[in-house]
Image (tube, helix red, strand yellow):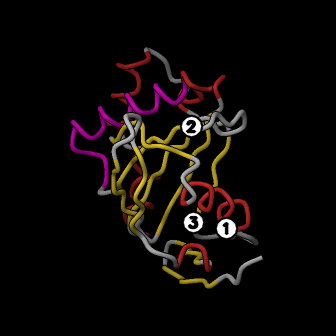
Amino acid sequence: MSQLRIKEYPTGKLYISDELLKTHTLTLNDLKGNQMTIMLGEAINLCKFSKRAERNLNNQIAFLSSCKSAGILPKVCIYELKANPPDPEAQHILIISGTYDDQIKYQEMFYLPKAESIFDSLFHSQDWSQINPESSVGNIAQKGYGLTSLDSFDALLRKIRNGDYVVSRTV
């Protein structure tokens, strides 16, 4: 278990572990075997999708791409990773990374009327579960909430750093 450092903000907390303090630049292969550099900000959310949730992943990427085109996606970096070799629990990971403030803006974006309108026009529904990952781990907590451990976050980040995932696409 790594040591947790906590940086407090008026809107919540940013948790920092030893694993997170390692380089914020990762060099991973893409699907064609070419090397690609991705940037990790201070605040990271790792959304896991198994093979059975691939439709949700594609829906979420379509939604986020539309929000980006509409100018309402905050300044976060978004990468889709694919397990190599396949991992039944986390076949795909969506990395959403940026500053603490941009991550909070990202979480709040889902409640904007413009985002709700985009979602409705894409999916003709108000069923937001169509874009949900099966699980996610991150290093931020909004005001009133907290994290007791980053162990599962660190373990998944280590797998990514070790090259167990390749970059499929960016948003």
Please provide the residue range marked out in magenta.
56-74
**Residue name at image x 60 percent, y 29 percent:** 129
Q: Can you tell which of label 1 and label 2 is closer to the viewer?
A: 2
Relative image position of residue 151 (x, y in whole percent): 73, 66
Badge 3 marks a residue whose secondary structure is strand
Along the line of sight, the residue nearer the viewer: 152 or 23:
23
Relative image position of residue 116 (x, y in whole percent): 40, 32
> Is residue 123 found left or right of 47 in the rendered image?
left
Question: Is 66 covered by the magenta stretch?
Answer: yes
Label 3 to label 1, Cα distance in Å? 6 Å
Q: Estimate how packed mark 2 is, as few (under 14), some (14 to 19) or many (20 or more) residues with alpha carbons within 10 Å.
A: many
Residue matched to label 1:
145
Relative image position of residue 78 (x, y in whole percent): 39, 48
Along the line of sight, the residue nearer the viewer: 146 or 49:
49
Any mark on residue 92, and which? 2
**Residue name at image x 66 percent, y 22 percent:** 52
Q: Which quadrant of the view contains residue 84?
A: top right
Residue matched to label 3:
142
Q: Which quadrant of the view contains residue 70?
A: top left
Earlier along the polypeptide chain: callout 2 or callout 3?
A: 2
Residue 96, relative to residue 67: is it above or below? Answer: below
Amino acid on which the number 3 mark rests in the picture: Gln
Amino acid on which the number 1 mark rests in the picture: Tyr
Residue 78, relative to residue 120: is it above or below? Answer: below
Amino acid on which the number 2 mark rests in the picture: His
Q: Estimate how packed mark 1 is, as few (under 14), some (14 to 19) or many (20 or more) residues with alpha carbons within 10 Å.
A: few
Label 1 to label 2, Cα distance in Å? 27 Å
